[in-house]
Image (cartoon, rainbow, N blue to C red):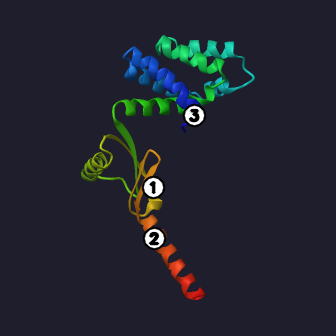
Amino acid sequence: MVNAIGVRYAQALFDMAKAKNQLDAQLADLVKVQLIFREHEQLTRALQAPTIPSPVKKSILQKVLSGRVTDTTLHFFYVLVDKGREVYVDSVVESYRELLRQSRDEVKVIVQSADKLDENLIKQVEASMKSYTGKKVELEFEVVPELLGGLLFRIGDRIIDGSIRHQLNQIHERLSKAGAAAVGG
């Protein structure tokens, strides 16, 4: 989940990486750290525990991340610890990805469908979304059986709902309104 704090820290890191011409390398480091945290729940709990002092957390980070990530990334995580922002790692990573997309005139489109889409349909969706947005698209697919059929697109904060579920809900609303109007009028 993205939030203002994650965006602010991601922007600072993005600006440093851009100045060093290391945008992709920085993203790779962030993803690496995120995966390490996800694979080691005890590590994550220790880093997020308010009872563990910052120097201890930094020592843990040093032991776990040294040699795996750049010094810039390691020191960035030291800053997160010093500021008590360890819980925002996922937000920072997603915000950094979004900043990178924006810098490349790309957009992320989440495509939900009731079943897995075949390659031909995926190509059609990609072409349609590229035409619709006017940008290069990064597609992420999710299978949501409750949609019953059709597609639902999430582009930033916009939703285009062409699902059967949505259409049925609209029909239900119209029938309810017509029924209420008939009873009341």
Amino acid type of disc 3?
Answer: Ala
Instruction: Identify the secondary structure beneath mark 2.
Output: helix
Q: Nearer the viewer, residue 71 or 102?
A: 102
Q: Residue furthest front?
A: 185
The residue that label 1 is drawn on is 144
Q: Say few, some or many: other residues with alpha carbon within 10 Å of mark 1 (under 14 / 14 to 19 / 20 or more).
A: some
Image quadrant holding the N terminus, namely: top right
In this rendering, which labeled residue sits more in front, label 1 or label 2?
Answer: 2
Residue type at the position of mark 1: Val
Which mark is in front, 1 or 3?
3
Disc marking residue 113:
none
Q: Quadrant of residue 3?
A: top right
User: Reading the chain from its start, which is encountered first: label 1 or label 3?
Assistant: 3
Q: Residue at x 66, y 28 (%)?
A: 45
- Give whichever of discs 3 and 2 has the lower sequence position: 3
Separation of disc 1 and disc 3 at Cα?
Answer: 29 Å
Q: Residue at x 62, y 15 (%)?
A: 60
C-alpha separation, residue under disc 3 versus residue under disc 2: 36 Å
Q: Based on the displayed image, in which of its 4 quarters is residue 162 positioned?
A: bottom left
Name the spot of residue 50 as percent of width and height, x first.
73, 25
Q: Is residue 122 left or right of residue 171?
A: left
SS of the residue at dot 3?
A: helix
Q: Could you classify mark 3 by the number of other residues whose Cα lies within 10 Å: few (under 14), some (14-19), or many (20 or more)?
A: few
Return the residue at label 2. 168
Amino acid type, mark 2: Leu
**Which residue is disc 3 drawn over?**
4
Q: Position of residue 159 (x, y in %)?
A: 44, 53
State whether residue 38 appears in this view: no
